[in-house]
Amino acid sequence: QETGQELVIATTRPETMFADQAIFVHPDDERYKDIVGLHAINPANGQALPIMADDYIDMSFGTAVMKCTPAHDPNDFALAKKYGLDMPICMNDDGTMNEMCGKYAGMDRFECRKELVRDFEAAGVVDHIDEHLHQVGHSERTGVIVEPYLSKQWFVKMKPLAQAVLKNQQIPDQKISFVPERFEHTFTQWLENIEDWCISRQLWWGHRIPAWTNEKTGELYVGTSAPEGSDWKQDEDVLDTWFSSALWPFSTFGWPDMTADLARYYPTDTLVTGYDIIFFWVARMAFQARYCTDNRPFRDVLIHGLIRDKQGRKMSKSLGNGVDPMDVIAEKGADALRFFLTTNSAPGMDLRYDETKVDAAWNFINKIWNASRYVLMQLEPETEYAIDPASLSASDQWIMDRFNRVLAEVEKNMDSFEFGIAGNAVQDFVWNDFCSWYIELSKTDKSRNTSAVLLEVLKKSLLLLSPYMPFVTDTIWEALPSTEGSINVAQWPEPFDFVSDPQLEKEMDLVIQIVQAVRELKSEYRMKPSAPIVITVTDETGEPVTLSQKAATALEGLCHAQLADRKPEGESVSRTLGTSVLSAALSDLVNVEEEKARLEKEVTRLQKEILRGEKMLSNPGFTGKAPASKVEAEKEKLVKYQTEFALVNKQLNDIDKIQSKK
């Protein structure tokens, strides 16, 4: 006004100009240094606005001149507090313009915007209008643009509450421990930089603010119940959801009364939650519990990650990459989804949703189901089964010792919240040790004691699996004899109480290695699985290994192999078993004449395939024009044929050696 200079100011909300209180520029901006302290005329209402300087202004953005509307913008509000500016409101709380706006009073805010811009254009004060993409908050329920608006709200003074929590974080038996530990820094950092908390919300449901205003005198009363008299009106706002939910750890046990549940269960043991609500929920439970109960709400906080899509992206509506867990449950079951989630994650780490891994979990559950059916088939109706420690076979002792080891591993990892490691350990035991080996071993020993061990190992395994797959384990549990009630209230399993024989267990580990090697040999040399075979196993010194009668019986039952006490005569085939070597006479593995004819025929076939592949891959017309996937497939086939050719040639050479010695 004093110089006649025009200032160009950009705004996306011209309807709020009726509440403008100042113009701001940067104190170092040479363009405007001479006008700081002067005034500018607001074209919306003709008022003179002081021109002020503050380093909040970005000199590189737009014209670097900003209007300040304290009641309608949070950043402007902060500037107004700093400089003591007035904070008038130019809108009603229904989104219409109020009496400050002159002829625009009563108009909807957006209608006012249109009319005001038309009037500005007519007055010649519009420099230009640009399309401008910017973030505007919208109501999730109504889709309406959220209007920043100065209003009276209820606040909690946070500094004293935060300091009480931070103080107790230095006391070992009072602090809240985080897993992983790094999230404690997130927790304490937020408390150290705390701001007062607005706890009132304009919603239709929730805990109503416990405050009453006297409609005659204006007196304000805060309490747990309304004051006496008929002129009191309760505040219509409700408490912030996080305020209400922060009461959960103690209010659910009957607080403020000292109930038996509160005395027994509070503070609670562990909170399991995501890292994205450490501020919103964990910290608020901490300071509300400290204030209301003078205690921590829980001892430990286990932080889990977020579930992302297979490409590692956060699931969102806009990307359309969300997975509805109810759809997965309907198709594959809750247990399969639960097992996938718990065994593919680590504390504090995000995990990627992978349908193939959910399928793998389903396959594991199917394996447990079939194993349970087998065990039930071995049991006679109305018969009590108890393990006789004096009658344990080698395989019985082996599986019981294996269970004791996995139980210790599971307990160790669960105590440190490594549920994924614990779950994978149980899966490995159940799938490999129990289903793949012990059940097979049990088929060679139909004694009642073996049935008792089968039943007891299954029961204890189900108890370990119950936290990961509660539904299928409960169904199987209730079908087993000598079980009462649901598995979900059963006692955690105890280790097997028996005198372990380390030598026998070592022998059984060797037996399993031998069985695997013998089965591979029989498959390689086209022998029937039931065909008998004589083998020799030598230790690292070259001396033949012997087995106890119990271990030898298990070996014979699983692969029809007999262990000789001397090396085979003539040409032999060998396999390495750790520090030991298994050998078998080649003449026992094959019918020499038939096998030689078969191998010679196979050599001819493979030579043709190799020649064809090499010719194709050396042809530029193919490698240069064919799809890359096709070329790669041909390369893989060539490598496969070359590997098979080398193996068949070796087998032919072995047969030639046998014939030459005859």
Image (cartoon, rainbow, N blue to C red):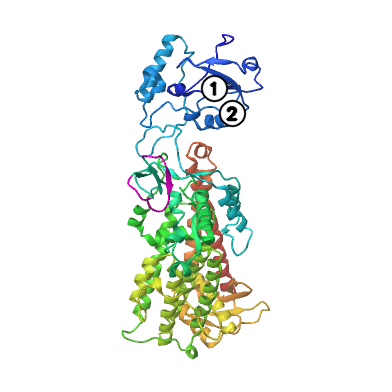
Q: Residue at x 59, y 83 (%)?
A: 503
- For the residue carrying disc 1, how many other residues have a C-alpha within 10 Å: few (<14), some (14-19), or many (20+)? many
Question: What kind of element bears circle 2?
Answer: helix
In the depicted structure, whether residue 249 falls above or below residue 378: above
Check contact, mark 2 vs mark 1: CB within 8 A. yes
Three-letter residue code for mark 2: Tyr
How far apart marks 2 and 1 lie (CA) works out to 10 Å
In front here: 436 or 26? 26
Query: What residue is rendered at 52% in x and 31% in y?
Result: 77
Principal secondary structure, stretch drawn in magenta: loop
Q: In the image shown, does 513 or 390 lie closer to the viewer?
A: 390
Q: Which residue is mark 1?
A: 22
Q: Is residue 630 above or below residue 103?
A: below
Q: Where does the magenta region start and end?
A: 216-230
Quarter of the picture containing the N terminus is top right
4 inside magenta stretch: no
* Residue 638 pos. (x, y %): 52, 51
- The local secondary structure at tag 1 comes to strand
Q: Quadrant of the C terminus?
A: bottom right
Q: Amino acid at mark 1?
A: Ala
Residue 33 occupies which quadrant of the picture?
A: top right
Q: Is 292 placed left or right of 36 in the picture?
A: left
From the viewer's perspective, tell me whether residue 542 is left or right of residue 315. right
Is residue 424 visible in the rendered structure shown here? yes
Mark 2, Cα crowd under 10 Å, few <14 / some 14-19 / many 20+, is few
The residue depicted at 47 percent of the width and 61 percent of the height is: 601
